[in-house]
Amino acid sequence: MAWLLLFSAGLVEIVFALSLKYNAGFTRLIPSIISLVSGGLSLFLLMTALKFLPVGTAYAVWTGMGAVGVAILGIILFKESADFYRLVSISLVIIGIIGLKLTDNN
């Protein structure tokens, strides 16, 4: 259950980060509301998962999921670079997340 909470926190973190792009410095109402709600929900889910998971593992997975998700969606939505080194770097973060999951005893 803790890993499901952490995975959910990571997905909501992606929504939060992307909403920051659209809220234009909190000058657009709906994207700003999405930023505030998703940011709070992501932190709540992370805090709940931290009751059962080591803080280092949970935080690394949470930030890694956010970074990977936003990087991939940046490529898709905003036509950001998808060069070889960027894709390799994203892959390395994914490998790290998988490694942390595989080495966790919870």
Image (cartoon, rainbow, N blue to C red):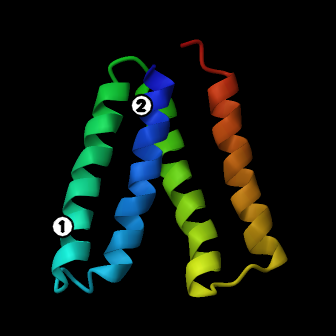
Disc with the residue nearer the chain's start (2 vs 1): 2
Depth check: 31 or 63 in front? 31
Say which quadrant the C terminus sits in.
top right
Q: Tell me the CA gap for discs 2 and 1.
A: 22 Å
Q: Is residue 24 left or right of residue 76?
A: left
Residue under the image location 63 percent in, 77 percent down: 76
Residue 17, placed above or below residue 52: below
Q: Residue furthest top?
A: 105
Instruction: Name the amino acid, label 1.
Output: Ile
Disc 2, SS? helix
Residue 67, placed above or below residue 31: above
- Give coordinates of residue 90: x percent, y percent: 70, 61
Categorize mark 2 by other alpha carbons within 10 Å: few (<14), some (14-19), many (20+). Answer: some
Instruction: Name the amino acid, label 2.
Output: Leu
- Give coordinates of residue 36: x percent, y percent: 20, 61
Residue under the image location 44 percent in, 22 percent down: 2
- Give coordinates of residue 65: x percent, y percent: 54, 50
Residue 52, placed above or below residue 63: above
Q: Is residue 44 left or right of residue 73?
A: left
Categorize mark 1 by other alpha carbons within 10 Å: few (<14), some (14-19), many (20+). Answer: some
Disc 1, SS? helix
- Give coordinates of residue 50: x percent, y percent: 35, 26
Q: Is residue 19 left or right of residue 93?
A: left
**Residue of label 1:** 33
**Residue of label 2:** 5
Residue under the image location 25 percent in, 65 percent down: 34
Say which quadrant the N terminus sits in.
top left
Residue under the image location 35 percent in, 62 percent down: 16
